[in-house]
Image (cartoon, helix red, strand yellow):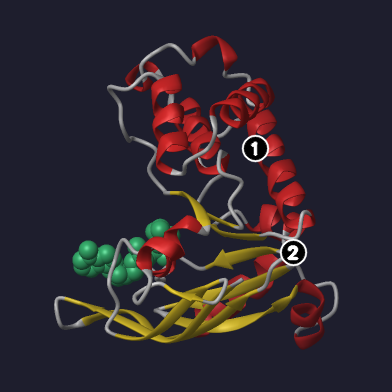
Amino acid sequence: MIEIVGVSKTFNGKIKAVDDLNLVVPAGEIFGFLGPNGAGKTTTIKMITGILNFDSGRITINGIDVKKNPLEAKKQFGFVPDSPDLFLRLKGIEYLNFMADIYEVSVGERKRKIANLAERFEMTEVLSDQIQSYSHGMRQKIIIMGALLHNPAVWILDEPMTGLDPRSSYILKEMMREHAQAGKTVFFSTHVLEVAERICDRVAIINKGKILLSGTLEEIREHFKQNESLEKIFLELTENE
Ligand SMILES: Nc1ncnc2c1ncn2[C@@H]1O[C@H](COP(=O)(O)OP(=O)(O)OP(=O)(O)O)[C@@H](O)[C@H]1O
Ligand SMILES: [Mg+2]
């Protein structure tokens, strides 16, 4: 579970990227974080994961305060950032072993996990190649694999579908569903509303740093006209702002 209470973030003393944000992401569900470009999604995710500091408010992950107990908080989650261009000089397998070392995954467990994830993502053949030789989608997949090795309680993904082909995107959605079904938390941002509509149990729509609406898809539909698509609701909401 992720809890965000009254969190604000201002850049350069004037741009209010996130404005008094309150959000609860429960365990056992897939939570979609939606909003137009520049809405504050990545900023929020960077504050949850401890990459960015925030001006006020409180964030806890499974009850652990990210500011007071940053290391313990970081052990709770696996993170897939919006750009996968990391550790390019490492071979895929070196990167995965590096991640497994950081999260103290035993040798037997990592071998089993890596073999399984590589097979599902069709990455087995390229694990001994350098990441810089990978395509965008392959880089995305190696980062996703690295984020899952320690079987995190909370999985945080920023625009994870970008660059994935239909098969990989399908497998990722399947993995997200399995993770939630195992009682864990899945929190991801996306622009792809059809995906959100299909796989999310709950969504929040953010614009200009403020949450406009959050709830289960049924609650949201009840609030609006029945049978209205998420796309239409999204467009209406973000246009009026
Ligand atoms: N390091 C920074 N310095 C100054 N302004 C920033 C910085 N990072 C983000 N911003 C500003 O904060 C606002 C929110 O940006 P953010 O990256 O969180 O949006 P986003 O919802 O992730 O958008 P996108 O859908 O395009 O990824 C934008 O106005 C952006 O210009
Ligand atoms: Mg972003």
Relative placement, left or right, of 166 versus 198 is: left
Label 1 within 8 A of ligand 1 by Cβ: no
Q: Nearer the viewer, residue 59 or 222?
A: 59
Say what amino acid the circle numbered 1 marks. Answer: Ser
The label on residue 181 is: none
Relative placement, left or right, of 182 versus 188 is: right
Relative image position of residue 227 (x, y in whole percent): 84, 72
Q: What residue do we see at 53% from left, 32% from top? A: 141
User: Is tag 2's residue or tag 1's residue first in the polypeptide sequence?
Assistant: 2
Q: Which residue is mark 1?
A: 169
Q: Label 2: few (<14), some or many (≥20) within 10 Å?
A: many
Q: Secondary structure at mark 1?
A: helix
Q: Label 1: few (<14), some or many (≥20) within 10 Å?
A: some
Distance from the alpha carbon under mark 2 to that under mark 1: 21 Å
Say what amino acid the circle numbered 2 marks. Answer: Gly
2 vs 1, front mark: 2
Relative image position of residue 51 (x, y in whole percent): 31, 61
Q: Secondary structure at mark 2?
A: loop
Up the image or down, 92 lies above or below 62; here it is above
The label on residue 28 is: 2
Residue 150: quadrant of the picture: top right
Relative placement, left or right, of 140 versus 118 is: left
Relative placement, left or right, of 12 versus 96 is: left
Label 2 within 8 A of ligand 2 by Cβ: no
Res. 23 in view: yes
Relative image position of residue 161 (x, y in whole percent): 57, 44
Q: What residue do we see at 45% from left, 20% from top? A: 93
